[in-house]
Image: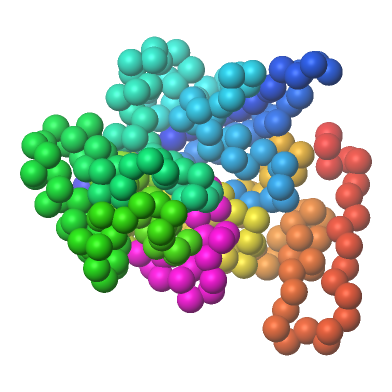
Amino acid sequence: MKRRDPLLVVDGLRVTFDTPRGPVAAVRDVSFVLGREKLGIVGESGSGKSQTGRALLGLLARNGRAAARRLTFDGVDLLRAGEAERRALRGRRIAMILQDPKFSLNPVMTVGEQIVEAFRVHANVSRREARLRALAMLEAVHIREPGHVFDAWPHELSGGMGQRVMIAIMMVPEPDLLIADEPTSALDVTVRLQVLALLDDMLARRGAALIFISHDLGLVGSFCDRVLVMYAGRVVETLRADELQSARHPYTRGLLACQPRVDGDGSDLPTLNRDPAWLR
């Protein structure tokens, strides 16, 4: 039976950072409802995409604070949940793939140790069982020599290999919601397609939801079901992914026009002209 109630409800989310010059609003009144689907969040750097994802997990910097009219995950009030309840959700039911595996993986632990640690924390199994499952997980993310990669250090991996390892670690607890923050930005086109196909397959088998954060409108339009377009911390447009090319907001139209095209005439790309009214 399919879930009818929304998995995640975000109503009026605000993220503010205290700075020496006063409070800075990074996310302003963001609202959306998420079911068992793939939701893309796009926008320029600094538009609030990543901070929106981090706020859901309670992973803001120490000078940051989140507030909302409503913020619930599967009926759990994330604003009122204590730290113990948050920890029970984080990783086990809500997981996040960070942008660059070079900075996300622990440099003083082998790849295998990090996957084994994830299994032992979330699955409560013996070290031997965790090792066997870790090797199987590396195979599941299409790594050809899982034994070799298991004993490797993070700095010995390529970008695509590191991203596969990150996906493996985050999928260990089989979360209901996966937040992927620019998971393919450092990958070449071929590896990017392989990683996306792998991610799509694992989500489909688990029946999990995805929040896919990216600046690549073309990629989000082809991979996700719905798209939120953010500008200066606000959502300026929400539409189905297959309708992205028919977007109406001038900011979204401007982002689409700025993308290079293989069949273009070689002329300079247009510059995005911002309207102060978008901030209001």
From this view, report whether residue 16 is shown above or below residue 160.
above
* Residue 234: image location, x then y, percent: 71, 37
At 63% from the left and 61% from the top, the residue drawn is 216
* Residue 10: image location, x then y, percent: 53, 31
Q: How is the image coloured?
A: rainbow
At 88% from the left and 75% from the top, the residue drawn is 268
Q: Is residue 86 left or right of residue 261?
A: left
* Residue 68: image location, x then y, percent: 58, 21
Q: How many marks?
A: 0
At 91% from the left and 41% from the top, the residue drawn is 276
Q: Which stretch appears magenta?
A: 181-198
Using the rendered view, name the quadrant where residue 239 is placed.
bottom right
Residue 21 visible in image: yes
* Residue 130: image location, x then y, percent: 14, 44
Residue 237 visible in image: no
At 64% from the left and 52% from the top, the residue drawn is 42
Q: Is residue 135 left or right of residue 226?
A: left
From this view, report whether residue 244 is shown above or below residue 49.
below
Where is the C terminus found, in terms of image quarters? top right
From this view, report whether residue 141 is shown above or below residue 214.
below
Residue 194 belongs to the span the image colors magenta: yes
Which residue occupies the foreground of this view, 95 or 229? Answer: 95
Using the rendered view, name the quadrant where residue 67 is placed.
top right
Q: Is residue 119 left or right of residue 243?
A: left
Residue 263 belongs to the span the image colors magenta: no
